[in-house]
Image: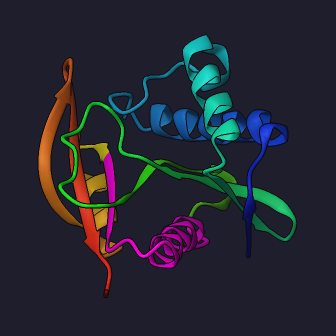
Amino acid sequence: MVIRKGSSDDVSVVLGMFDSAVAWLAARGRTGQWGSRPFSADPARVERVTEWAASGGMWIAEVDGEPAGCAVLGAAVDYVPPAREPELYVQGLVIDQRFRGHGVGSALLGHARAEAAGRGVALLRVDCYAGDDGRLVEYYESQGFTRTEPFKVGEWPGQVLELRLPG
């Protein structure tokens, strides 16, 4: 697996990753996280992915030369309480469902840890959907993150998690 810097050339590929994840979730009746409409059909989500690509914080994981996942790293999002110390925030993480179970998410989170450490930052945070059966929160916990603040955006339940890096 190779992890490379993302660019504006990756917008359609990343939208396709989100579309595959939405379809996978919807097929299992799990529409609470991202709904059932493809990201590529939602102008606000297309704009968000386009902004991520321009931010310099987008990273693409490739498996055998095929884009398999994406992580976006940067400042904390505005709907979560700010950290009281310098941090790196995982603003987005998505895996193309063709590569589900191949360790792509783990590799991208490992890259996020390395980026944080390289910047001298001891705190890595992420937020995720905390509804349904809580499996997404459990996934991040399996990656070494610890729950901190729960939050809501409208009726959408979220959970902030953090990972402390050795300093």
Magenta residues (range): 101-127
The percent coordinates of residue 55 (x first, y second) are 63, 41
- Is 140 on the left-hand or right-hand side of 43? left
The verdict on residue 44 being magenta is no
- Is 75 on the left-hand or right-hand side of 42? left
Q: Which residue is drawn at 54% across and 18% down?
A: 37
The percent coordinates of residue 20 (x first, y second) are 63, 39
Q: Residue at x 61, y 71 (%)?
A: 102
Quadrant location of the C terminus in the rendered image: bottom left
The percent coordinates of residue 147 (x first, y second) are 16, 60
> Residue 155 or 25: which is nearer the viewer?
155
Hey, which quadrant is residue 140 in on the image? bottom left
Q: In this view, does 154 lie above or below 22?
A: above
Quadrant location of the N terminus in the rendered image: bottom right
The percent coordinates of residue 43 (x first, y second) are 62, 12
Question: How many circles with numbers are drawn on the protein?
Answer: 0
Residue 131 in view in this figure: no
Residue 160 in view in this figure: yes
The verdict on residue 125 being magenta is yes
Q: Which residue is drawn at 60% across and 67% down?
A: 104
> Residue 52 or 22: which is nearer the viewer?
52
Hey, which quadrant is residue 161 in on the image? bottom left
Q: In this view, does 123 lie above or below 96?
A: below
